[in-house]
Amino acid sequence: MLEHLGEEYANLIREFTYDSSERVLYKASKLSKGFVEQGLGPEDIVDIHMRAAEQVTRENPPLKGPQIILNSFGLLLESMMAYGLAHREYMESKSARFSDLEAYAYELETLNTALEQRINELSVLYDLTQVVNSSLDLQTTLQVIAEKLMEVTEYDTCNLYLSGSKAKEFQIQLSMGVNAGVYQAYGFNSEHRLIKAAIENGTPLVFQDVKTEPRWERIKGVNDHVQSWMSVPLIAEGKPIGIITLSSSEVKAISEAGLKLTSIAASQAASAIERARLYEETKRLAITDEKTGLHNFGHFKFLLGTEIKRAKRYGRPLSLFMIDVDDFKIYNDCHGHLDGDRVLEQLGKTIRQSVRDIDFPARYGGDEFAVILPETDEAEAYAAAERLRACIEQRHVPNQGVLPGGKLTVSIGTSSYPTSADTKDDLIRNADAALYRAKREGKNKVVMWLPTKDIR
C-alpha cells in the first residue's frame, strides 16, 4: 500500500510539473487522507515527497531538476495542510475514545516539533536550490552550499573537495568553520588516505567516534578537535566530481536526518557545481587561443582598449610588443603543420613564463604574437623585449636545424603610450611597423618605434 501511495505521489509531481493548477492540488489533498489512514506521520510524508521528487528528477534532464524540486514544494505544502486537517479529524475521534487528553497533547506537540524541523530543513533546501541555481560563479556556489549545510546542522567544520580538470586528484576548494584556514593551508587532497577512501567508497561514509576508527589520522592543530566525521560524495552524470566532509567536536553528532539532508543537498550541489564549471570553461574558451593557451585575438583587442583607457585616465605609460617567428614557413614546409603547431604551443608557454603576471600575452594570428605591458615605458619595454627575444633564442625546439642559423628566433617591434602612440590602433600600427623593420634588418632583433626615429 505504501508503494502505491508513493507512486501515486510521484505521478502528482509529474502532473504538477506541467500543470500547477488547483485541480492537481486538490488531488494532493485527497491523497493526504490516505496517508492518515495508513498511520503515516509528517516525517513519512516528507520522506515520500523527497523520494518521489528524486525519482521524477532522475527522469528528466539535469538542468530541469532544480525547477521540478522548486515546483514540488507547492504540492508538499498543500499535502501537509490537508494532512493536518485530516489528522485533526482522526485525533478528535481518537480522543473521544481515550480519556487521557494529556497524552493526546503530547503526541500532537511531538508531531508539530517534527513537522517544524522538517519544514525548516525543506526551507534550507529551497534556499539552497534557489541560490546555487541562480549563480554561475563557482566560488559563490561552494560558499552557499557550505553556509546552508551549517545552518541546519551542528557540525563545526565543512570542507568541499573538487576534482581537477582531468578528474585525477581531488583538491580542497573551500573550508568553513573551525580551523578553516588551517585545513586549506594543509592542502588535503585525494592522496590523503581518508579522502581517498571517501571517494572510493562512493556513498556516505560516517564515523560516529573517530577514536574507534583505524583509518582516522589525527593531525595536531588541524583536526585534533574532531570527534565525529562524515563525507558525502558529489555525483554528476554518474561520476564523482567531489566530496563534502562535515565534522563535529561531539561524539555521535551525526544524525540520520542530518545525513539524509546532506545527501539531498549534495545531489543538488553537484548539478550546480557542474553548471558553474561549464560556464567558467565556456567563458575561458571564448577568450583563449586553443593552440597556445594565450589570449585570443578578440580578447587581445578588448584588453588593449581597456588598458589604454586606464593609462590615459591615470597618466601612466603602456607598451605593446608585436612578435613574429622568423622563417617559420621553412619549418612548416620541412616538418609539416602538426610539428609546427607543437612549436607554437611551446613558444606560447615560453612567452607566458617570460613576461610579468600583470602583462597580457596573446596570439595575434598565425605565427604572430603580441604582449600588452601595463605600467611600462619605452625603455623598460625595449629591455623586456630583448630579454624575451634572448630567452626564445636559447630555447631548443625539435628539428630546429632546418631554420637559418639552426635555431628558432623571433623579431619584435615595440611601441609605447604616450611616447609613440595615442590610441590602441596607433599602438598596433607602430609596433607592427617596428616589427617589419626588424625583419628587413636581418631578423632576430628588437626595434622600438618612435615618432622621429627608430631606436634599436
Image: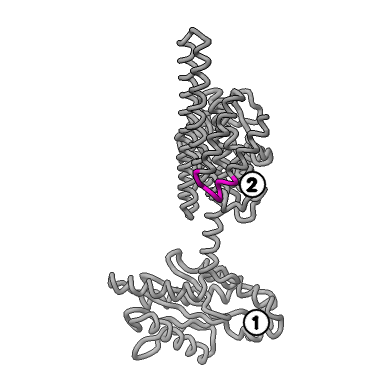
Confirm whether residue 189 shows in the render. no
Q: Residue at x 48, y 27 (%)?
A: 85
Q: Please identify the quadrant where the N terminus is shown.
A: top right
Bounds of the magenta segment = 14-22
Whether tag 1 and tag 2 are in contact, CB under 8 A, the answer is no
Amino acid of disc 2:
Arg
Confirm whether residue 223 shows in the render. yes
- Residue 406 shows which numbered tag? 1
Q: Secondary structure at mark 1?
A: helix
Q: Secondary structure at mark 2?
A: helix
- Is 329 on the left-hand or right-hand side of 130? right
How does the figure colour the protein chain or chains? Answer: one colour
- Image coordinates of residue 209 in percent, x first then y, are 59, 24
Residue 17 is covered by the magenta coloring: yes
In depth, the one of 12 and 179 nearer the eye is 12
**Label 1 Cα neighbours within 10 Å, binned few <14 / some 14-19 / many ≥20:** few
Residue 383 is covered by the magenta coloring: no
- Image coordinates of residue 359 in percent, x first then y, are 44, 68
Q: Residue at x 51, y 92 (%)?
A: 440
Q: Please identify the quadrant where the C terminus is shown.
A: bottom left
> Residue 309, located in which quarter of the rendered image?
bottom left
Q: Residue at x 57, y 39 (%)?
A: 264
- Residue 286 shows which numbered tag? none
Q: Which marked residue is nearer to the observer: mark 1 or mark 2?
A: 2
Give the main secondary structure, helix, strand or loop, of the magenta stretch: helix
Residue at which label 2 appears: 58
In depth, the one of 403 and 338 nearer the eye is 338
Q: Residue at x 53, y 15 (%)?
A: 94
Amino acid of disc 1:
Gly
In depth, the one of 250 and 19 nearer the eye is 19
